[in-house]
Amino acid sequence: MAGKGTKGRGGRKGGDAPPDWARLLERRMDPGLVCLDPAELQLYDRDAAPLPASAKWAFNPRPDAVVRPKNADQVRKVVRFAIKAGVPIVPRGAATWGFGGAVPNNGGIVFDLQGLSDIHVDRDTMTVTAGAGAIWRDVQDMAERRGYMLPAYPTSAPGSTVGGWINTGGVGVGAFRYGGIERQVRALRVVLPNGEHVRLGFDRVIPNSSGYDIKSLIIGSEGTLGIVTEATLELQPAPEEFRPLAAGFPTSKELGDFIQLLARSRITPYHVSFYDSSHLSNLERLGEDVPYKGGLVSLVFEGYSAMVGWEWEATAELVRRAGGEVAGERFANTTWDEHMFDLRVARDGPTLLMNEVFVPLSRISEVMAGMARIINSHNVLGGIVGTAASRSTASLMPYALVDRRKWSTFFAFGLVDEFAQLAMDLGGRPAGVGLWMAYQMPELHGESMGAMVAIKKALDPKDIMNPGKLVHAVSKFDIKLPAAVMNLGTKSISMVHTLLADSGRRKRDARSNGSKGASEAAEMVEEERAEDLEEERAAMEAAEAGIDTETGDDSEGTKEG
Amino acid sequence: MQLLAGTTKGKGKAPAKKGQGEAEAGRSRNQLAKERPPLFAEELWACMYCNYCSAECPTAREVGWESTTPRGKIRMFKSLVDQWRPNRGVEVPDAFVRAVYECTSCGRCSVVCHVGIDFLTHHEELRRWLARSGCGPMEDHDVMVRSLKNYGNPYLSPSRDRARWAEGLDLPTKGEVLYFAGCSDSFVHPDVARRTVAVLGALGMDVAYLGNDEPCCGSTAVRLGLEGPFADLASDVRRRIEGSGAKLVVTACPGCSSAFREYYPKAGFDLDVEVIHLTELLDRELREGRLRFSDRLPGRYVYYDPCHLGRIDGVFEPPRRVLEACVEEVVELARSHEESLCCGSGGGLKTAFPDQATSIGGRVVEMAQDTGADTLVTACPWCETNIGDASAAKTAGLRVVDIIEVVHQALHLDEAVEGTEKRKRRAPGRLVG
Ligand SMILES: Cc1cc2nc3c(=O)[nH]c(=O)nc-3n(C[C@H](O)[C@H](O)[C@H](O)COP(=O)(O)OP(=O)(O)OC[C@H]3O[C@@H](n4cnc5c(N)ncnc54)[C@H](O)[C@@H]3O)c2cc1C
Ligand code: SF4
Ligand code: SF4
């Protein structure tokens, strides 16, 4: 339907004129695909992280255009346009990640990919093929309706997309038994930064083989190597039984002991999550009945009932051995039922500041104690939600509840960085990088950084695919940011001011030199004018000759590879 | 951050919107709201941007742009609240008005919200604020607003036609059990009204009705934020129900039942009678043994939960029990009960955005087809119309009926009642919910 859904979204008013290339994009693409309305664009300037306004001093998170493709061909066409115009591309799923991956560092085209939402289950190969914008919960529902289960999904499944979790290399529900997203992907379809739409991996058989595993490069690439349009994921047969177990512990110490006992046993629950005492008291403040004060673990088992029953009993024994108490069935069920709503504590904030880190499972009690100290030192409410991501690794989401409207909150943003630093000091690492943590990449990846940069350069020589993320920390003035600037805590304030002072000069420079891509875009506008004239002439000639001019243009299809 | 700054300058009439049905020439609208915006912004600050609401919102799913998602709207709302100043009010851009009305009032966002933001209630409050300030509803709703004013119903139909469904039935206008037909069943689904009366009659209930004097319940006025018209209709309804001597009011329309039970008390119009939805009454009769079926109708049926009967009023099981008692096989949609997908017609969406409404209804049709059912049964005239329209548009061949049609057929009452065919003449243009 032409223009469907764009009513009232087309115009642009006031002195907020879009760049020439954006107008050109709008004219060249299918109706309803491109949006240049400033009120709409403004809504695409953030993800789940509630950033302080100061972040906008360093970055220009508002896109110049948003496209909302409904199929891969539209993605490919816009990418090709962006390559030609030298305009940044920012892939965006549902923007539920909190590291700024889907937020522009300096305008450009945001691809809102939620329109790529088809889901298809293949019984022969026991796989599900989903559009990159499909919501995880819908994929899960479809799999269940066809008699399968999705081995892994993020706890944000009711809101986040397949492409988003793949590009963050996520770990979530099901990780203990089946691993993170990297273990589920058989094949991806990706529009690369050269405009080709390629298949990576194999749909019908497992992807292990000789040959560079490009598919795996894409997983966790945070949208810097291409736009995923579709993913083929492995399924598991639906289990006979799903059975939760909940256990309360006196303190984080016993909780940690239990998780280690579990990890070193042969018991393999589907999922293990845990909550520290502060989180539990935050839930109590919301009026919830929480019988355990010191710490809570929620596990779930799946498979044949006989085996589930055995593992359940064996785990209950470990709980007791570690000094914990097994909760009643009802409490276990409700805790599991709420597993996608753990962050409801934000209601009390109202702002939730959080980070996600991976730490050695053997040190979780230590890390949790350290995080609690950080939270206390800032004199804010907070808590820790964690997952046993494997037998060796825990994923922790420490959070603080603050009020963003208060100026003092600016200082609390430093918490996020302190959590990451603590994790690194104890042998762990932040779970994501994105825009806000890109400055930490060298410290995180050390000597492999060089190879990463080389790969990025080889695949994206113009650096248009999600620039400023992962491998480059770049502000809107094209300055490579020093680590301290990105430390949005107390230390950073002076640096932000320095940057501000610097910004006037840089802005002037940018204006006189022309911003990145501006000259290419100007050339394109010129070319387009010439092309338009040419097209018009051709159309008139064709009409006279009775030829259809709509076909035959730009029709390179999907490549298999 | 001024999210909405610069989108609309100055005062004056909002530009006429084209392309979605035949909007009538618009009355003059304000773009400056003097009154302070509703102060619910406190709760909205807790939004953590998880997108749970957007993934479930029927209009967001349909249109997609961030401004149609509940979380996107929350940002716009907050921005407007921030911009309001006591001495100069706030400019209300078209984009904002559109955001407030591009919503079916299905309430799914309120149920699913991670932090419990009751977005539906805020939405309704905002609509009232916009209407009080003269900034809403949209021009596309004008036809409906005028219809309510001039005809006392949303269907541009003269009052003298209201009780045509009851012709020849000789119903009293006073009695203990009052059947409140509602505008939709009176003007669009007269078969439902006739069958309801026939079934209640078979159960030994002598029902009264209000004839041509039956007013609109006012639920459409509520949805558009029109407090004045709603208050007028509600007081008229209360007066006439009192005058009928009714102790029990039965209606087959969840718009009416939820208005009577939810919105009347909130607006100070408590009805001093028991109000019951038809499915609850049938369920009561079934459980108490008065409603009995000698056999079950063959076929696979799927029950669809209307938003206002289910999510808003909490009536989920009664219609299922009734259906299970009278047909061979009842299956569930992939999304049912609290998770039911909106049919797309509510909140005035079908009036202002008819294509969107039909397209949303199409998703319900697809889901129903996925179950292999040949008949979708609902208990709301708005849903019946919109899902029926969507099924026809898709040439899906899915039969969409009100539950009373199934009950009526299972009781073998068809032979006994004449005039049960659907009325061909529809309200001009479109319908509203
Ligand atoms: C309540 C809550 C719970 C969460 N639980 C988990 C959890 O259990 N595990 C976990 O790992 N994370 C979790 N997260 C973080 C986040 O939800 C996940 O990482 C999620 O999968 C991101 O998906 P998205 O669609 O929102 O991606 P976005 O935030 O839109 O994007 C994330 C990154 O991927 C890129 N990207 C998105 N789509 C594409 C595409 N199609 N092609 C190329 N690049 C793309 C973006 O550029 C960006 O860099 C949670 C978040 C919330 C709010
Ligand atoms: S009430 Fe329904 S249509 Fe309206 S915003 Fe909420 S989910 Fe969307
Ligand atoms: S579900 Fe609630 S918290 Fe999440 S984005 Fe929607 S309104 Fe915000």
Image (cartoon, coloured by chain):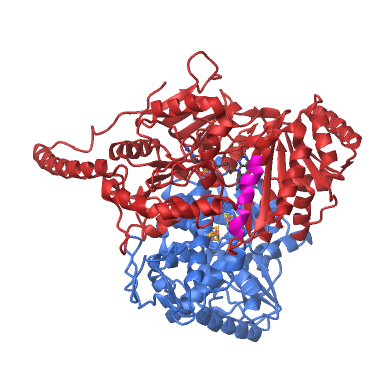
Chain colours: A red, B blue
**Residue nearer the viewer, A375 or A265:** A375
Q: Which residues are magenta?
A: A409-421
The residue at 30%/29% (across/down) is: A556
Magenta segment includes A410: yes
Within the image, what quadrant is residue B123 found in? bottom right
Q: Residue at the top extreme?
A: A210
The residue at 49%/53% (across/down) is: A496
Q: Percent from the top left, x then y, of residue A146?
A: 61, 34
**Residue nearer the viewer, A310 or A511:** A511
**Residue nearer the viewer, A228 or B431:** A228
Split into 4 quadrants, where in the image is the C terminus of chain A? Answer: top left
Q: Percent from the top left, x then y, of residue B4?
A: 42, 64
Q: Percent from the top left, x then y, of residue A468?
A: 44, 40
Give the mark count. 0
The residue at 19%/43% (across/down) is: A528
Q: Is residue B207 left or right of residue A90?
A: right
Q: Main secondary structure of the magenta part?
A: helix
Magenta segment includes A67: no
Note whether A174 is above or below A350 in the view shown: above
Q: From this viewpoint, is residue A103 visible?
A: yes
Q: From this viewpoint, is residue B64 visible?
A: no
Q: Percent from the top left, x then y, of residue A165?
A: 56, 38
Within the image, what quadrant is residue A535 found in? top left
Q: Quadrant of ligand 1?
A: top right
